Image: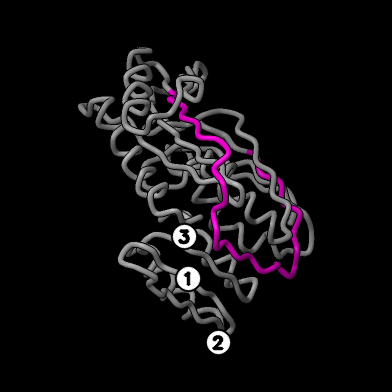
Amino acid sequence: GGEHRCSIGTAGSATLVLQTVLPALIRADAPSRLTLEGGTHNPLAPTYDFLAHAFLPLLGRMGVRVSARLDRYGFYPAGGGRIVIEIEPKRALGRLDLIERGAIRACTATALFSSLPFDVARRELEAIRARLDWPETSLRPLEVKDAAGPGNVLTLVVESEHVTEVFTGFGEKGVRAEVVAERAAAECARYLDAGVPVGEHLADQLLLPMALAGGGSFRTLAPTEHTRTQARMITRFLDVAIELRPESERIFRVEVKAA
């Protein structure tokens, strides 16, 4: 526990640093406060929005209070972002079961853009509206004016009765805004069509806290190789069994239980 600070010095992912130390700090003998500086919205890493809206609330349901605050955005390759995390530990985590998604309460799309034309965000949101048929009231452009460098991130949030899921598209040099939107929309559409509570990225994030709790379960899409690797690795370190059982060609039930 205690006060910790980590300045990566590049656009390296601050959220991956958090995920490295979080399993220890949620079981520490004292509260902790982390200030992490670096990338907050990176490709191939959970974004701040994913942690804040999808992952950390589920930890809260397991008994751990983790609050997150975004002080400054950090996009690749400039970095310069800052997040502050406060953790109230709990030695024994509670079991979490996510079998049904429940009714969808809200769907929103936010197009972040920094040091880029507004037209980029407009085109992304128009593509989302056309692909997913979301109302205009759920689409929001957001200009970030204090970031260290340019960036563009499209975030789709699906808030349901039992879980909130987040899907992300990243703007890249030479990639059209419509392509960025289509990639994020396609992933979101697969999730919505399957009717499961847990998306393919949240699936591998939940395995470790469930293993530390000694059990848990959820229904999800067909596991990625990342999820399968995570499951194999966890069972080498912790005395648990992780079963990935197909219910259909595209839907799996994941069970974590004491070995």
Q: Secondary structure at mark 3?
A: helix
Closer to the eye: label 1 or 3: 1
Q: Residue at x 48, y 64 (%)?
A: 219
Give neighbour class at mark 3: few <14, some 14-19, many 20+ (Cα, 10 Å). many
Q: CA distance from mark 1 to mark 3?
A: 9 Å
Q: Look at the image and give the residue range highlighted in magenta.
A: 84-112
Which tag, 3 or 2, sits closer to the chain's start? 3
In what element is the residue under mark 1?
Answer: strand
Q: CA distance from mark 3 to mark 2?
A: 20 Å
Percent from the top left, x then y, of residue 154? 40, 31
Labels 1, 2: front one: 1
In the figure, is residue 89 to the left or right of 135?
A: right
- List the residue tagged with mark 2: 259
Q: Quadrant of the C terminus?
A: bottom right
Sequence-first tag of 1 and 3: 3
Name the residue carrying label 1.
Answer: 254
The residue at 28%/30% (across/down) is 172
Circle 1 packing at 10 Å, graded few (<14), some (14-19), many (20+), is many
- Of residues 120 and 252, the one nearer the viewer is 252
Does the magenta segment cover residue 108? yes
x then y, percent, for residue 63: 73, 60
Q: Name above or below for residue 103 compared with residue 218.
A: above
- Name the one closer to the observer, 193 or 148: 193
What amino acid does circle 3 point to? Answer: Ala
